[in-house]
Image (tube, rainbow, N blue to C red):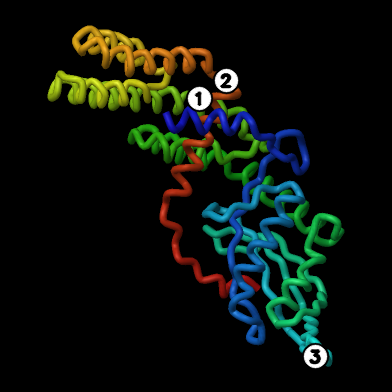
Amino acid sequence: MVMKKVLLLILSLCAVSVHAGDCDITLSAVALNQGDKVPESIKEKVKTRLMQAANASGVTAIDGYDRFFIGARFDNALYDVIPGPPIKTAVKSNLTVYIGDNFDKKVVASTSFDVNGVGTTEERAYINAMSSLNKRNRAFASFISDGVDKIIEYYDRNYTSILNKAKEAMTMRDYREALYYSTSIPACCKGYSEASELTLAIYRQHIDYEGSVLIGKAKAAWGTDPDSYGAETALGYIAEIDPESKYYKEGEALAKEISSKVKADWEYENHKKYEDLLELEKENIKTERQRIAAAKEVGVAWGQNQKAPQYNYNWVK
């Protein structure tokens, strides 16, 4: 049920394209260590600003974990005090922005800016110095474009091995992991067509497997407590079965059996709600494009639930 609600949300969003119509590149925003003179508190501010600038420039920057990341650091800071009132701090620094590969520990693209900022505190001065980090900055736009090109080249070279990982996970019934790999290929890359076919196959097995688990739980709940309590629990499981799962009809049959054995007032109040929900789900039978979007959401959720390694970004130079 959660997956279906998420699908409706996905369909209401529009992906932003970088080069071609449907090329959505995702970058994990990371907080790199800053130069010696830079306040520690500025790390998260840099990360937030990078996410805003990257998203505005046509890539998807997330506060989560992914293969490719975007990060930045201030170096060679010079300070000056401006007499008040109020007394202000002026900072001149060099800001270097990176796109890198978390897995291979490799910088994909980088660029540097000389920045200046003035504020009532050092932190505010640095925040103001980042104002030039936006999509109107030609150097930053060129940096994003270069990084995206390199990421596309990576997937064009390696999509076969990525899809093999998806197939291996599929064989092990690790469908969510399999979808993480199969949906990671951007639409503008060579392997996208093959990846889409595999994604649909994995997704079909995924919803069938999930359906079998849910119908098993529903039967167990009803068998253990063949009363209003057991009925409510069982129907909750049944309602989560995807309408395209081969177990959907079995779920409907079990729901009718349950409703025929519980008291009338409970049936009217709860089973009627369940039937209305099923009708709504039937109306939302997914097209191929929608199934791929739903499958991608499952894969992304799996990836975000993985505990990211504690990477040391000291190699980023």
Horizontally, is 218 left or right of 77 in the view? Answer: left
* Three-letter amino acid code at the position of disc 3: Asp
Which residue matches tag 2?
Answer: 288
* Three-letter amino acid code at the position of disc 1: Leu
SS of the residue at dot 2?
A: helix
Res 273 → quadrant: top left
The answer to whether 18 is drawn above or below residue 195 in the figure is below
1 and 3 marks in contact (CB < 8 Å): no
Horizontally, is 30 left or right of 211 in the view? Answer: right
Which residue matches tag 1?
Answer: 200
Nearest the viewer among 194 and 316 is 316
Nearest the viewer among 300 and 118 is 118
Q: Quadrant of the N terminus?
A: top left
Q: Residue placed farthest to the left in the image? A: 224
Nearest the viewer among 268 and 259 is 268
Give the spatial CA distance, label 1 vs label 3: 60 Å
SS of the residue at dot 1?
A: helix
Marked residue nearer the N-terminal end (1 or 3): 3
